[in-house]
Amino acid sequence: MDYKNLLYSVDENNIATLIINRPKAYNAINAETMGEIGHFFSKTAPKLKGIVGVVVTGAGDKAFVAGADIKAFLTLDNKKAQKLSKQGHLAYNHIENFDKPVIAAVNGFALGGGCELAMACHMRIAGAKAKFGQPEVNLGIVPGYGGSQRLVQLIGKGKAMELLLTGDMIGAEEAHRLGLANHVVPQGEEVAKAKEILLKIATKGPISIAKTIELVNLYFNKKKDGFKAEIEAFGACADTKDFKEGASAFIEKRKANFTGK
Ligand code: DAK
């Protein structure tokens, strides 16, 4: 499917790349773009046969995503804002729960809804010029796409509180130090680093990768017991061909050939 504000492709290694494509607005996310992101992760990406993961990045060399589109904010009232917020939560939950790894290649500003997009991904690679922040308080609003929760999950309450209350931006190195960015790379090498990690993950058993994503996410689900789920997932993995193959490959001192079965 063609999108108005997104570009996507799949490379020779079966890695999908999704580009948020509104460079003149620093890739700011309006309702249409958010709808497209939700559609991509719930409808399009699951049908991309054999992909090993997705890299998410921003068009141009200035921004990953500089936030929600502020120009669309003035017409919001309580009802419309809640609708918009729910749409964003839904879209970003699709990313977080995607059964293949999703890595944000943060090539510039990742602010507000952009930082939230990066945080919904399973990992973040920061280019040297990346800037992260949740500046909603500057606009008299709170994060609308999960930022008040995922920032705490990633960097802890104290630092999250500071960033959320001051609206300060931090650079790539500070984001790395805090655990918000997994790696910092020279500017322009974010996508390549993300792909390098995905290629490594592609050599593992796809069922165990999907289950691991599910289990890590469960840690933050207050309604479910992640420890119990891990026991069940471990049992389910034991029944797969991949598990027999992985164990046999180790014993036979060869590389495993996983089939996802
Ligand atoms: N929205 C719309 N346009 C934006 C934008 C944004 N977030 N960020 C940048 N742009 C546009 C600028 O308007 C400008 O367009 P033109 O004026 O040329 O047409 C172009 O991108 C380049 O921006 P600048 O000229 O400002 O570029 P600079 O390099 O000087 O500055 C900057 C870059 C990123 C520091 C600056 O653009 C900036 O401060 N941008 C705004 C950052 C920001 O505050 N983002 C919003 C974060 S808050 C909710 C739903 C969602 C949210 C909250 C609640 N509910 C439903 C309740 C989310 C909130 C946020 O995301």
Image: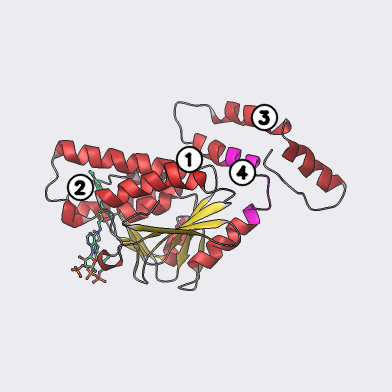
Q: Is residue 188 left or right of residue 29?
A: right
* Mark closer to the chain start, 2 or 4: 2
| Colour convention of the picture | secondary structure
Task: Give the residue displayed 46% in from the left and 43% down from the top.
Answer: 96
Q: Position of residue 154 (x, y in %)?
A: 45, 48
Q: Is residue 177 left or right of residue 37?
A: right
How far apart are labels 2 and 4 at the CA level? 37 Å
Amino acid at dot 4: Ile
Q: Secondary structure at mark 2?
A: loop
Q: In the image, which disc is placed on residue 115?
A: none
Q: Which residue is mark 2?
A: 141
Q: Secondary structure at mark 1?
A: loop
Image quadrant of ligand 1?
A: bottom left
Q: Residue furthest right?
A: 252
Q: Which residue is mark 4?
A: 209
Dot 2 alpha-carbon crowd within 10 angstroms: few under 14, some 14 to 19, many 20 or more: few
Q: In the image, which disc is placed on residue 97?
A: 1
Q: Is residue 12 above or below residue 153?
A: below
The magenta stretch spans residue 151: no
Q: Is residue 33 left or right of residue 72?
A: right
Note whether ligand 1 is within 8 Å of mark 2.
yes
Q: Quick one: 63 or 228, which is closer to the camera? A: 63
How far apart are labels 1 and 4 at the CA level? 12 Å
Q: Which residue is mark 3?
A: 236
* Mark closer to the chain start, 3 or 4: 4
Q: Range of the magenta residues?
A: 200-212
Q: Quick one: 5 or 104, which is closer to the camera? A: 5
Q: Position of residue 48 (x, y in %)?
A: 52, 49
Q: Is residue 211 above or below residue 139?
A: above
Q: Are the two marked residues, 3 and 2, in contact with CB atoms closer than 8 angstroms?
A: no
How far apart are labels 3 and 1 at the CA level? 19 Å
